[in-house]
Amino acid sequence: MQKLKAANLYRSELIPVSGKLVERYNKCLLKLGFSKTKLKKFSIDGIGWSPEIAEEKKDDNYLCNGPSNPHGIIISPLQNRKPVYSPYHSFDRDMMQLIFKTYSKKINDITRDSAIIIDFDQKIDAFYEPLDVLKYDEITINFHLMDNLYHQQREQFELIEKFKTNHNFIDEELQSQILESAKAFGDLRGRDLELPNLKFKTDSFYTKAYNGVYVLRDFIKPIVVFEDQKSYKEAIKDTVHDVLMYHISHIELIEKLKDHIIIESNLEATVHTAKYDRVKKFEFAQLLKEVNHPVNEILNNSVLFKSYLNKLDVKARKQVMGVELYLERLERSNAYKLEDMVDMQMYFALHKPHSSLSVKHQDLIWKLLVNVSPKDVLFLYWYDKDQFYKNYETWDESFKDWVISTIQKNI
């Protein structure tokens, strides 16, 4: 990952945590029922997730009490507008933006000496079967302050009122209680620590529950797409819910998404785009075997590209150039069938969200498409960084250079 870090493409907006902030973070972990981190320094994203702690605990979802109970931690106002690098839901960043938009000033005040624990309450205590994800509706965002600071404030108010009553100002025990509270939590009288819960309405979304599920329910008929084969096989036994269900590898999925006006494809237009160029070069790079030049150089040099393309066997060559061959022959006759000439995974990679979709829905569908066929390295980086980082680790070093330069050109 060193190359990505040097190019500022690997979690470059994380917030460093050390000193007293580590202590506050650990108090939040304990309050949530988790174990402390032993790390003295780490970093967090917008929702309070830390890649170092995830690695320490060997659990990317360490802020979840089971798949139906995700949480967040705010220990710094700097988390405002920061990315959520490993979201449990596709709408996690939207929820964090709502929180900071509503309570920005209060968060600035509270995090001077405390921290905020976020409970994303879906009104689901636990999941029992895959289609329980359809229960997602309105999420209640609840807030809890470290050390129960809001309740300590209430207690200070009560102690002070008692102090003002009759001759209680001479009560040494009461005086001691007030001083102890002030030493432990500061003077809380003038601070606004109340954070009423917020409501967040879900529509179509992705969740990591059951190893990855897409719920598309704002279209002709609800569609549920599973990334995990076991979860899919369990879900199709359901006879209660009237939804369409697919595994992400199903070829029928793409056709159904097109039928529902969720995605579209125009090969004649796409073949002239930078997207097509990226997909074609990705496909080519995966087929290269014995090379005498760096892959990065082969992909960027048209002479070398043609040279190595002609070194491939005919089947591999057609796999790379299938789209162009198909369109060329289609001009002469409509007898040619796309499925006979174009690799289906490459074809799927050239689809896009339908232009009629809202921006929010387009982002979700892009994520789905790059998971169906992760051949566009730029869009994979944009829409599914977790998967991009996993795939990146498997690539040739020189190909990594091409990937990095491709992303940098488009940022």
Image: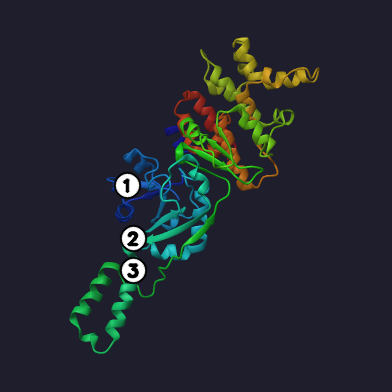
Of circles 2 and 1, which is in front?
A: 2
Residue name at image x 55 percent, y 35 percent: 380
Q: Tags 3 and 2 in contact by the CB under 8 Å rule?
A: no
Q: Which mark is residue 151?
A: 3
Q: Residue furthest bottom?
A: 166
Q: As displayed, is residue 340 above or below residue 209?
A: above
Amino acid tagged 3: His
Residue denoted by label 1: 41
The answer to whether any part of residue 129 appears in the image is: yes
Q: CA distance from mark 3 to mark 1?
A: 30 Å
Residue 146: give its label: 2
User: Which is more toward the observer, 22 or 193?
Assistant: 193
* Apparent side of residue 377 relative to residue 394 in the rendered image (left or right): right
Amino acid residing under circle 2: Met
Task: Please state if 265 lies on the left or on the right of 198 as rendered.
Answer: right
- Nearer to me, 53 or 164: 164
Image marks 2 and 1: residues in contact by CB distance under 8 Å: no
* The N terminus - image quarter: top left
**Sequence order check: which comes first, mark 2 or mark 1?**
1
User: Residue 397: x percent and y percent?
Assistant: 47, 24
Categorize mark 1 by other alpha carbons within 10 Å: few (<14), some (14-19), many (20+).
Answer: some
> Alpha carbon of mark 3 to alpha carbon of mark 2: how far?
10 Å
